[in-house]
Amino acid sequence: MEIFDRAAAAQAQAAASDQRRVLVPTMGALHRGHLELVRMARQSAGDQAEVVVSIFVNPLQFEPGSDFERYPRPAAHDEELLREAGVDVLYRPGPDEMYAADRSVYVEETSLSETLCGRSRPGHFRGVCTVVAKLFNLLAPEAAVFGEKDFQQLAIIRRMVRDLDFPIEIIGAPIVREEDGLALSSRNQYLSAEERAQATILSAACAKARDMTQRGEKSGERLLEAARTVLAEAPLARIDYVEIVNAETLRPITHIEAPARFALAVFFGKTRLIDNIALA
């Protein structure tokens, strides 16, 4: 596995490569969910192509007062996991390498980012789009893999690629869960034992909405009421949002018809967890 921490070196390696390249952008603190993204990247790339992983804790997507400083950065562990997974290239720059001190240009999506996490975290998706656009330019992939757990992020990246004419295929990877249903996340390690036990309520609320829809319920109001009732069973859960949206526009809908997505964000203490599920 080749490792680069300088943009110029990573860009030169990409320019010299004549193989298909598939990128998995991450912020590190890797877990089984990330390794599934790598597996899908390898599947897409093929044995004779390159799987490229980036690790960068992007300061632009952390709002003031968030967990940027305490976000886990287990560099040696991450490197070992990626070597074992057969990754070809690892790019892990520092903030000074990614951003000039006097930077003044950003990439901003202005429609899909107005709802869900975008409403709760102003500026977050501007940071996401800016760093992903830079990674696309530096690492020159033909395809990139993003997880469906961050469904809004996936939709926004697809829109950015379409609107800015990036010649890159965006591959969505299904959510990977623990045996008890909790969606895998680097932030799960912040949870206390009691919070971790109650955090399964997110997937339970998703399952409730899905099951009611499969039994014929079409009222968004009744689905949301049922989901909130499930969430109320976890005393430590503090709801940020619980919504049903059109999966393409991400606008709230009141009647279930395809494509529909149930999405929620819930705090346990200072830890904010997200989850989502397709309804139609």
Image (tube, rainbow, N blue to C red):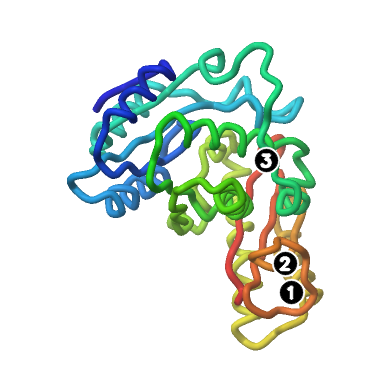
Q: Are marks 1 and 2 in contact (CB under 8 Å)?
A: yes
Task: Assess disc 2: are there few (<14), some (14-19) or many (≥20) residues with their C-alpha within 10 Å of its C-alpha.
Answer: many
Kindly indicate the quadrant of the structure image that contains residue 126.
top right
Residue at disc 1, secondary structure:
helix
In the image, is residue 232 above or below residue 267? below
Corner quadrant of residue 108: top right
Q: CA distance from mark 1 to mark 2?
A: 9 Å
Q: N-terminal of the two: label 3 or label 2?
A: 3
Query: Mark 3 is on which residue type?
Result: Phe
The residue where tag 2 is placed is 244
Tag 3 secondary structure:
helix
Residue 146 in percent (x, y) is at 48, 48
Tell me if residue 88 comes above or below residue 247 in the rendering.
Answer: above
Q: What mark, if any, has residue 223 been given in the picture?
A: 1
Q: What is the distance, in whole Å, between disc 3 and disc 2 at their CAs? A: 20 Å
> Can you tell which of label 1 and label 2 is closer to the viewer?
2
Which is nearer the N-term, disc 3 or disc 1?
Answer: 3
Q: Is residue 239 visible?
A: no
Tag 3 and tag 1, C-beta contact below 8 Å? no
The tag on residue 125 is 3
Query: Camera-side residue: 6 or 87?
Result: 6
Q: Amino acid at mark 2?
A: Ile
Question: Which residue reaches farthest bottom?
Answer: 216
Quadrant where the C terminus sits is bottom right
In the displayed structure, does residue 191 sit left or right of residue 218?
left
